[in-house]
């Protein structure tokens, strides 16, 4: 069991009092005020710390159901090299807001011989089982991956905000299955087009997710069993990363469908962790919408993004900085001449 801390209620109350006294009509900065109070509670200070140190960790892994993607399995490993070269979407978007990007290979199906040890240090396995016909992970691997994700969060514990990203061809089918199993939803409601499958691709994907749910029915109540049956090493690690971030009082901006699926499982493992999260953006995947609704999170941005990698969440960083700025720098009504 985890003793999840509660974001500081005194800092939240002090932030709210200051927000109410700022030189504006009461509540006129809307959602920005909510975010400012949330950030103050998470950092335990008014104003919150400047968000100078924002870090993205891209959890990479292959999936047994990669044939359900619009792109070939080999893209996952190739993209690890793109992240390292600084040329991915999230590298470029993170650079815009001064965020750092780290990639962690939890389960890519390659040897990655010439990538830095820091990338593969927490590797659990190569690929995962094809969840429509077999378990994703061997017994014990879900917990090992969860612990690996916790270790990664400990390595990044100086951050002011953490962002989980993802790279893995086929991972949207895995996410749909995890979300469906977590919330008791049918495959047809949660499966989306991922990287852009056509109508027949969507049918095949829905059938595979339905088969995965039928195969594992009755044994996915336990979150670690759910990760073993339907998840992957990278999503289990992300759940561990989210839990450890909350234990260390680090606020998190969730990204797309992969974040949402990991977050649902993390919340089942450690209830209360969701208080440490904001949803950076709404992705196009239906299972992300279900996950965010169940977590009580309203996305900050809605740009129709479906890239993953952490790319949507990094774009919400300026909004968090704006929320901090109002509380740090605006004048007070009481000082009006
Ligand atoms: O973040 C999202 O919501 C999202 C939606 C669609 C696709 N993706 C990315 O695309 C890959 C998974 O798509 P697919 O079609 O291969 O399952 C994976 O690398 C994700 O990061 C991500
Ligand atoms: C090129 C490419 C980049 C990605 N980044 C995240 N998912 C991806 C899927 C593809 C196909």
Image (spheres, helix red, strand yellow):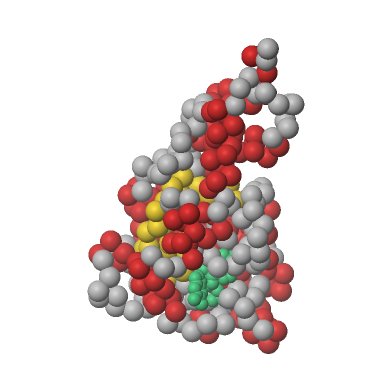
Q: Nearer the viewer, residue 287 or 265?
A: 287
Of the four image quadrants, the one with ligand 1 is bottom right
Q: Position of residue 72 (x, y in %)?
A: 49, 84
Picture quarter with the C terminus: top right
Q: Nearer the viewer, residue 319 or 131?
A: 319
Q: Position of residue 282 (x, y in %)?
A: 64, 58
Residue at the image position 44 percent from the left and 79 percent from the top: 75
Rendered view: 330 above or below 173: above
Picture quarter with the N terminus: top left
Q: Nearer the viewer, residue 140 or 110?
A: 110
Residue at the image position 58 percent from the left and 22 percent from the top: 14
Tell whether 331 sits left or right of 227. right
Seen from this angle, which residue lies furthest bottom? 200
Seen from this angle, which residue lies furthest front? 337
Rendered view: 192 above or below 54: below
Tell whether 28 sits left or right of 64. right
Residue at the image position 37 percent from the left and 59 percent from the top: 102
Q: Quadrant of residue 191?
A: bottom right
């Amino acid at each position: 069991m985890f003793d999840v801390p509660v974001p500081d209620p005194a800092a939240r109350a002090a932030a709210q009092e200051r927000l109410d006294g700022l030189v504006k009509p009461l509540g006129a900065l809307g959602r920005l005020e909510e975010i400012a109070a949330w950030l103050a509670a998470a950092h335990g200070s008014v104003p919150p710390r400047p968000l100078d140190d924002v870090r993205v960790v891209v959890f990479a892994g292959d999936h047994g159901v990669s044939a359900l993607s619009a792109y070939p399995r080999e893209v996952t490993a190739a993209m690890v090299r793109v992240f390292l070269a600084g040329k991915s979407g999230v590298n470029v978007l993170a650079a815009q807001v001064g965020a750092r990007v780290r990639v962690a290979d939890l389960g890519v199906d390659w040897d990655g011989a010439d990538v830095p040890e820091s990338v593969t240090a927490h590797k659990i396995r190569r690929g995962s089982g094809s969840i429509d016909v077999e378990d994703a992970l061997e017994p014990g691997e879900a917990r090992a991956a969860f612990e690996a994700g916790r270790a990664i969060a400990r390595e990044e514990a100086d951050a002011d905000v953490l962002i989980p990203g993802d790279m893995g061809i086929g991972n949207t089918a895995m996410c749909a299955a995890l979300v469906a199993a977590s919330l008791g939803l049918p495959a047809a409601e949660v499966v989306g087009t991922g990287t852009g499958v056509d109508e027949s691709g969507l049918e095949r994907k829905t059938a595979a997710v339905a088969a995965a749910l039928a195969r594992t029915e009755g044994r996915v109540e336990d979150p670690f069993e759910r990760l073993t049956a339907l998840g992957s090493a990278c999503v289990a690690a992300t759940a561990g990363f989210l839990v450890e971030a909350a234990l260390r009082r680090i606020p998190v901006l969730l990204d797309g469908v992969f974040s949402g699926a990991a977050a649902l499982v993390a919340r089942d493992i450690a209830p209360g962790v969701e208080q440490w999260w904001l949803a950076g953006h709404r992705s196009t995947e239906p299972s992300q919408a279900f996950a965010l609704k169940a977590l009580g999170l309203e996305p900050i941005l809605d740009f129709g993004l479906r890239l993953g990698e952490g790319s949507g969440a990094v774009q919400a960083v300026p909004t968090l900085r704006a929320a901090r700025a109002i509380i740090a720098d605006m004048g007070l009504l009481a000082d009006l001449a």
